[in-house]
Amino acid sequence: PRELRVGAANRLSRLGSPEAADAIGEALETGPELTREIVIEGIRAGGRTTERVVVRVCSAAITGLISLDDAAFIIGRSGTVAIDDLVARIAEESAPLRREVVFNLLGRITDPAAARSLVELMQESHASPADAEAIDAALRHWSDTSSSRSAEGWKSWWSRMNIDGSAS
């Protein structure tokens, strides 16, 4: 039954061992859509999950196997370290479309640490025009605004928000 499978995914997520993360990753990467839905439901039912599980969830979201909203929910509940890991993935990712997906994912995480990271990424002098555009779109999503801003505009907006730290 579905309830048993959701419960098993929840327990694996909370366990977070390398073997549990591998089982979750395998289900997300190779399982049918129904299996992916059940695994995500199980992970979402728990609280924080481990870094190992977050890495597998991020990979599934970046490759389009699960929704960005599901991944954002899971990452957001897993704390600032999970957000920092996601930011580190940007540096490792060279494909512009995948970078855009990661920025988009950050913009869907409700934790203020995600928005702060986006503002900081926007400030980096080596941000390409494509990255700047994707970061701007992610910040517009996070802030629920339709107006674009420059790097300095977003920095000013963040300063006015007066949010420091993580909501986790």
Image (cartoon, rainbow, N blue to C red):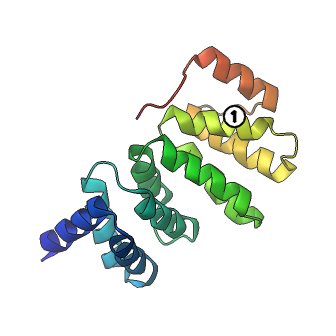
Task: Where is residue 106? Give x, y as percent.
Answer: 57, 47
Residue 151 against residue 108 in the figure, above or below: above
Left of 61 or right of it: where is 32?
A: left
Q: Is residue 167 above or below residue 29?
A: above
Question: Is residue 150 something one can see in this rendering?
Answer: no
Query: At which x and y percent is residue 72?
Result: 47, 51
Query: What is the quadrant of the C terminus in the image?
Result: top left
* Residue shown at 55% from the left, 22% from the top: 164
Above/below status of 100 relative to 143: below
Q: Is residue 93 left or right of residue 47?
A: right
Closest to the observer: 62 or 46?
46
Which quadrant holds residue 79?
top left
**How many numbered markers are drawn?**
1
Are there few (<14), some (14-19), or many (20+) residues within 10 Å of tag 1?
Answer: many
Identify the image quadrant of the N terminus: bottom left
Q: Position of residue 6 (x, y in %)?
A: 21, 68
Q: Residue at x 40, y 76 (%)?
A: 22
Identify which residue is drawn at 50% across, 57% down. 68
Q: In this rendering, is residue 151 above or below 80? A: above
For badge 1, the amino acid type reads Val
Secondary structure of residue under mark 1: helix
According to the picture, the residue beneath numbered tag 1 turns out to be 119
> Viewed as shown, does residue 137 lie left or right of 151?
left
Q: Is residue 10 at all visible to an observer of this figure?
A: yes
Q: Which corner quadrant of the image does residue 121 belong to?
A: top right
Towards the viewer: 33 or 57: 57
Instruction: Tell me where residue 141 appears, x and y as whole percent.
Output: 58, 40
